């Protein structure tokens, strides 16, 4: 397999821990619960994007880039980890943030600034156009920019999660543990695409269930077909003979609430419950929503009591502070 020979730089502390959530599992009275701690990848408070950036930043360096450009929501964890990775390798970082600039830089925005990133504020719709604009400007000043797509979700970024599945499979076989289903937050798709390719390569037989954070079941082209496209791009990069279609991806769209980044009772309650039973911190946008979905599925009897479910923690806790008001509001 060609994965080992592709350029990759070390940004994450791997392997991330695999732990049991015994108190939360007992309280819910459902399947056995495990957690894979990708909130602990270690780069500037960690998260799932660090694994993707090991391949993306290596590619940028190989291409002689001196600046990386990427985009996201104001509280993007991807942007924060990209800014930190760029700082670590001595590159410039330009972040295009779609949304309103906060009065006081908070949460991830504060950390972006600490890591030396330049911030460009625009609307969600104009993010890609703005990245191109910033790139053109840099080229005219004789810089060599490298654009990383939103969420780092292309085939190359997804390789971080191909690698992660190989890592998980090693941990499971060493611990003689069998996982029936992996549950996690899915949004720009690189994580899920990489996991599915990695499962095929490493022989992981369990189910991989993404809880959609903002993608809708009604959209065209379907989110699953986007996942298949990223997976096929990743497979090609490592000369894998596997091909993927939308049927290879399982996504639950039931927990979208009032939209991306809008905190509801689902997130408030899952964050509190996970923190007060396990001392484990989730985030209001991604991991809290995915855990809320998992808890609801357990309550509905979706899993067998004999199952082992692995919750893949993708990080995001730095955003908690930017959502302090919404998280402590009186509940309706
Ligand atoms: C980006 C992100 C996700 C979603 O991962 P994708 O690869 O974009 O699908 C989940 N959780 C957190 C905390 C994230 O920052």
Image: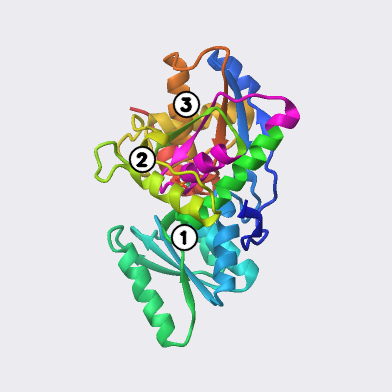
Q: Which of pointers 2 and 3 lies earlier in the amino acid sequence?
A: 2
Q: Which of pointers 3 and 1 lies earlier in the amino acid sequence?
A: 1
| Colour scheme of the rendered structure | rainbow
- SS for callout 2: helix
Kindly identify which residue carries mark 3. Answer: 294
Q: Residues within 10 Å of mark 1 (few under 14, many from 20)?
A: some
The quadrant in which the C terminus is found is top left
Any part of residue 70 in sight: yes
**Cα distance, mark 2 to mark 1?**
35 Å
Q: Please state the horizontal and vertical placement of residue 9, each as a whole percent of the image.
A: 65, 62
Q: Please state the horizontal and vertical placement of residue 237, each as a whole percent of the image.
A: 52, 56
Kindly identify which residue carries mark 2. Answer: 224
- The magenta segment: 172-201
Q: Is residue 187 magenta?
A: yes
**Cα distance, mark 2 to mark 3?**
20 Å
Q: Nearer the viewer, mark 2 or mark 1?
A: 2
Q: Please state the horizontal and vertical placement of residue 34, each as a whole percent of the image.
A: 62, 27
| Rendered residue at 45%/13% (across/down) | 301
- Judged left or right of residue 50, residue 153 is left
């Amino acid at each position: 397999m060609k994965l080992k020979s592709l350029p990759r730089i070390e940004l994450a502390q791997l392997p991330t821990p695999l732990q049991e959530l015994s108190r939360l599992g007992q309280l819910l009275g459902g399947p056995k619960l495990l957690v894979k701690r990708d909130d602990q990848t270690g780069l500037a408070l960690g998260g799932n994007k660090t694994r993707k950036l090991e391949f993306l930043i290596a590619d940028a360096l190989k291409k002689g880039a001196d600046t990386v450009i990427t985009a996201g929501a104001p509280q993007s964890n991807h942007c924060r980890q990209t800014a930190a990775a760029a700082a670590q390798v001595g590159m410039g970082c330009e972040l295009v943030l779609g949304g309103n600039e906060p009065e006081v830089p908070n949460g991830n925005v504060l950390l972006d600034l600490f890591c030396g990133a330049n911030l460009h504020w625009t609307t969600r719709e104009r993010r890609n156009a703005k990245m191109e604009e910033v790139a053109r400007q840099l080229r005219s000043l004789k810089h060599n920019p490298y654009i990383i797509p939103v969420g780092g979700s292309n085939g190359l970024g997804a390789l971080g999660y191909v690698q992660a599945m190989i890592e998980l499979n090693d941990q499971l076989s060493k611990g003689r543990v069998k996982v029936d289903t992996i549950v996690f937050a899915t949004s720009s798709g690189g994580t899920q695409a990489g996991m599915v390719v990695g499962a095929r390569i490493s022989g992981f037989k369990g189910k991989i269930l993404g809880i959609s954070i903002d993608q809708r079941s009604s959209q065209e082209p379907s989110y699953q077909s986007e996942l298949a496209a990223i997976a096929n791009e990743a497979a090609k990069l490592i000369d894998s003979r596997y091909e993927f279609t939308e049927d290879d991806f399982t996504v639950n769209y039931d927990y979208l609430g009032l939209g991306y980044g809008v905190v509801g009772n689902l997130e408030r309650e899952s964050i509190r419950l996970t923190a007060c039973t396990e001392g484990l911190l989730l985030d209001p946008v991604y991991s809290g929503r995915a855990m809320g979905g998992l808890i609801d599925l357990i309550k509905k009897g979706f899993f067998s009591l004999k199952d082992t479910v692995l919750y893949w923690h993708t990080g995001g806790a730095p955003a908690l502070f930017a959502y302090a008001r919404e998280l402590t509001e009186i509940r309706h």
